[in-house]
Amino acid sequence: MEKRVVFRSAWLPYALVAPQIAITLVFFFWPAAQAVWYSLHLQDAFGLKVQFVGLANFATLFKDSNYLASFKVTALFSVLVAFFGIAISLLLATMADRVLRGAMAYKTLLIWPYAVAPAVAGVLWAFIFAPSIGILTYILKGWGVDWNWIIKGDQAMLLVVIAAVWKQISYNFLFFLAGLQSIPKSLIEAAAIDGASPFRRFWTIVFPLLSPTTFFLLVVNIVYAFFDTFGVIDATTQGGPGQSTNILVYKVYHDGVKAADLGGSSAQSVILMFIVIVLTVAQFRFIERKVQY
Amino acid sequence: MVENRPWLTFLSHSVLMLGVLAVAFPLYVTFIASTHTLEAIMQAPMPLVPGDQLVENFTQVLTAGSTKGSKAAGATMLVNSLVMALAIPLGKITISVISAFAIVYFRFPLRMFFFWMIFVTLMLPVEVRIIPTFKVIADLGMLNTYAGLTVPLIASATATFLFRQFFMTVPDELAEAARVDGAGPLRFFWDVLLPLSKTTMAALFVIQFIYGWNQYLWPLLITTDESMYTTVIGIKRMIVGGDAANEWNLIMATAILAMLPPALVVMLMQKWFVKGLVETEK
């Protein structure tokens, strides 16, 4: 798509794009190039000597059992977050689309967690589930569950998944609600006249028609689980106990900032960049083709 | 509704109420915790009705922070958060709207090259270039400054696309008429295009306000000085160790401060918020 009517000026367009391009170059391209450069070099502990090592940093990474474990943790985490986030919000959106009374109030009361920072969401749930004083810990204890996410890996994972899903439901809910409201009512009515039950109508008509929204949300939720949940992890488990919630983004941060392993952390950054590129391409293909039925 | 099924309507309301309760539960516990003394919260189970320490707790965090962890005053942190939440959307909107204008309304060498350069930034979130970006900021002497907190975050591919998309829908006749009347590109931009873009800007502003307010990794990296902490960072810095070591009443009071402004923006500007959310993702 191009404009037919354009203006002419030898310098103005350059001046207009200059601020954006300058920031992009200084804070995006230059650091990204440096990440690639560092990932191919080995630095001694004092940062005095730098040596070109080719792909050795990558080779070390893929032999590192901690790194491979972090991949598995990230995969599990993002699948859980995406699945529960999408399932719960689809249920709520379907119900909200049905009710006539109070629909606006429900919507308002369901969307506000979008405004909560992931780190704050993490702190809230960490408090509720705190091993000695948490209110839900107390209830779980009454049921005979020994809850202590500080030493139990699977419970730590559950905690960060709950916090991440809780924050993301509002976003998914809004998109599902918009999707549901754009489905022509005549289709549903026709099926109802033919005697299809609400349950049947949902699975044979509504759900397939929502598939573009669902696919879009799937990609968005995976991106969210990969990157935006850094705050949830850092404010609660910090990757622990052991490696049980050490997702890739947290590991890059930990290895680079806390352990000061420049080469290894940069190699991880480069791998993450690759993952982002794949996810972005998936997202854009969706926008172009809108998923056909 | 297609047909009347009372039990299904009842079920819908039940599910929704359950959802609303589950979503609100953490907020309720947070609020309760912020109204008690630390001793009261430390008993299991903690009380579930408001206590009488609300004013004391909020006064403490607003003026002096916690006593064990970060001592940054809540009032300062709220100002820092507000600076981020305002500077990022304003900066983003400004540089995106002018670069979209250049790309849509001019033909010039390297136009597509610039367009792709902006596009590629989508694939380079802060999270994947943590250390080198930190180094750039350190080299430029921008650690612990407002400029360091905001400038690197205002480049935006999504905002540029959004304005580009919108400009493409503006009828060519408007630009033609402006030209016939002797208006230059800047005059056209200021008097015609900007007024037309108001709703897009408002929607973008609401989304980016929340984005700016809730920034975490970036301020975590570049603020070491307590006077530069944002509210979200402050909460994290108040957590000093295990359960019993933390002053949960103060942490929860700060959490309320951190949640209130963006939550109000979402609920009061719901229309812009929904519009912004749906459009920035397209």
Image: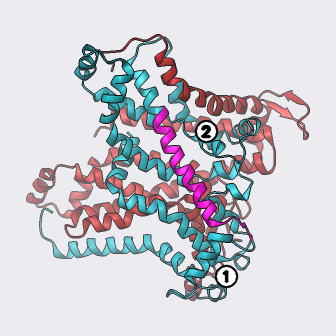
Chain colours: A red, B cyan
State the quadrant of the N terminus of chain A. top left
Task: Name the residue at 72% across, 30% down.
Answer: A34
At which x and y percent is residue A8? 39, 11
Q: Residues within 10 Å of mark 1 (few under 14, many from 20)?
A: some
Task: Name the residue at 76% across, 35% down.
Answer: B139
Horizontally, is A67 left or right of B47 in the view?
right
SS at mark 1 in the image: loop
At which x and y percent is residue A119? 59, 60
- Looking at the picture, which amino acid does disc 2 mark? Pro
Q: Where, by quadrant of the figure, is residue B213 drawn?
A: bottom right
User: Considering depth in this image, is B266 or A200 the residue closer to the camera?
Assistant: B266
What span is colored magenta in the figure? B69-95
State the quadrant of the C terminus of chain A. top left
Horizontally, is A109 left or right of A182 in the view?
right
Task: Name the residue at 14% across, 50% down.
Answer: A187
At which x and y percent is residue B185? 37, 19
Task: Name the residue at 61% across, 78% down.
Answer: B57
